[in-house]
Image: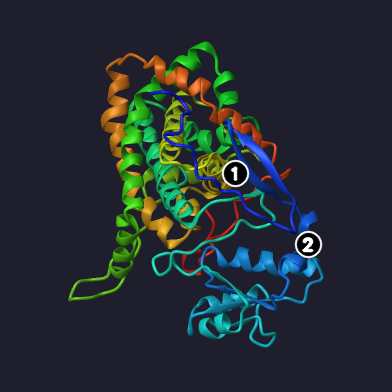
Amino acid sequence: MSAGLLSKPPASLDFETSVFNKEKINLAGYDEYIVRGGRNLFPLLPIAFKGIKQIGVIGWGSQGPAQAQNLRDSLAEAKSDIVVKVGLRKGSRSFAEARAAGFTEDTGTLGDIWETVSGSDLVLLLISDAAQVCLMSVALGSPFTFATTLELEYRSDIFGERGVLLGAVHGVVESLFRRYTENGMNEDLAYKNTVECITGIISRTISTKGMLAVYNSLSEEGKKEFEAAYSASYYPCMEILYECYEDVACGSEIRSVVLAGRRFYEKEGLPAFPMGNIDQTHMWRVGERVRSTRPAGDLGPLYPFTAGVYFALMMAQIEILRKKGHSYSEIINESVIESVDSLNPFMHARGVSFMVDNCSTTARLGSRKWAPRFDYILTQQALVAVDKGAPVNQELISNFLSDPVHGAIEVCAQLRPTVDISVTADADFVRPELRRSGN
């Protein structure tokens, strides 16, 4: 298999803007267009929103707080009189949360969904994905905004959540923790060599220097361990990712989300089955202990075998999206940037549930559904192959080292903000029903 070749050139996703500065970047030989983000764009917002008097943000959940407050504060900074109003279902528990964030009925910034929609010139629809597949724009505070289509964004977003962003990485760390402890490794060290390794040093290095920097930092013996793990894990990961992508593309996956939502409530004489916990096993209790004694700023150890499995997963996802015709900006965002910069910091701070359950209902359900699939296939195929001494597939390793995605990631890294996402150990869940005493 040739590394980095698109089965067909990605669709041309150029766009026109008379307000913002459009830049052309080259990612792995393909030209794409972006708008570079930054606070310097705030003065342009009144021009960009010319004719808009009210923006309705419909829904709260995991997306509403950030979207609504970002818009409100950005427009205030630009001295715009555009109203940002949050619309919620009558009787929603989120009214109290929205009021606490400064949106109130008295000021006309909080109300019923239909009232808000009817009175708004622009609407951000952020209700549950199970009820409405929605299109969200990348905020001006982001590193860059890239062009996409609703169909491609929908596929890569729903697929990515079930893959390396949430579900697959959960499956990876569960499988590897179990392997390491069964082979005699101290359980605190096993947690550090799985979760802390991925969410700490690996994520930080990829974010700032790329994947090859991780590989090149390994000793010769470490590279051999990495290559054995990578070679054995790549195709098992790709098998599940391929199935997942096709389930998303044909609509089966979102249908399963809708059906799961219906099972949250009693019906037809059958009991309710709400979303269950995902951090109750001994592994995550070990994680609490490790985090309680972790020195400030500690990024954990770089364990070569874990890096090999994780990179195999990440590269397999990149290849699936590439062969399905997605642009490199979208591929990198859904396979790399969101993982190492946005989501892994949450697991580093408070474990897997804190990462998964601060996301949308669709993402939470998908992660729970697919994580066991990755755990199972790695345990039954990849790790067995390693134990049997299966020869390393040198073509896979060569393809990894020469893949053009590394150069594309380097270009995107140059657009990276100068600050990291900060998730403190005492941070809490977005959803009030999930909040509990800190762990």
Q: State whether residue 349 is above or below residue 182.
A: below
Which is nearer the eye, 10 or 75?
10
* Quadrant housing the N terminus: top left
Which is nearer the eye, 344 or 242?
242
The figure's colour scheme reads rainbow
Q: Crowding at label 1, few (<14), some or many (≥20) Cα neighbours within 10 Å? A: many
Q: Crowding at label 2, few (<14), some or many (≥20) Cα neighbours within 10 Å? A: few
What amino acid is at disc 2?
Answer: Leu
Which of the two labelled residues, at mark 1 and mark 2, occupies the earlier sequence position? 2
Question: In percent of the image, x 23 and y 71: which residue is there?
Answer: 271
SS for callout 1: helix
Residue 416 visible in the shown view: no
Q: Which mark is residue 44?
A: 2
Q: Do the residues bearing badges 1 and 2 touch, measured as CB atoms within 8 Å? A: no
Residue 230 screen position, x and y as percent: 41, 24
Q: State whether residue 231 is above or below residue 265.
A: above
Residue 12 screen position, x and y as percent: 54, 45
Residue 76 screen position, x and y as percent: 77, 70
Determine whether, in the image, residue 28 is placed left or right of residue 151. right
Residue occupied by mark 1: 341
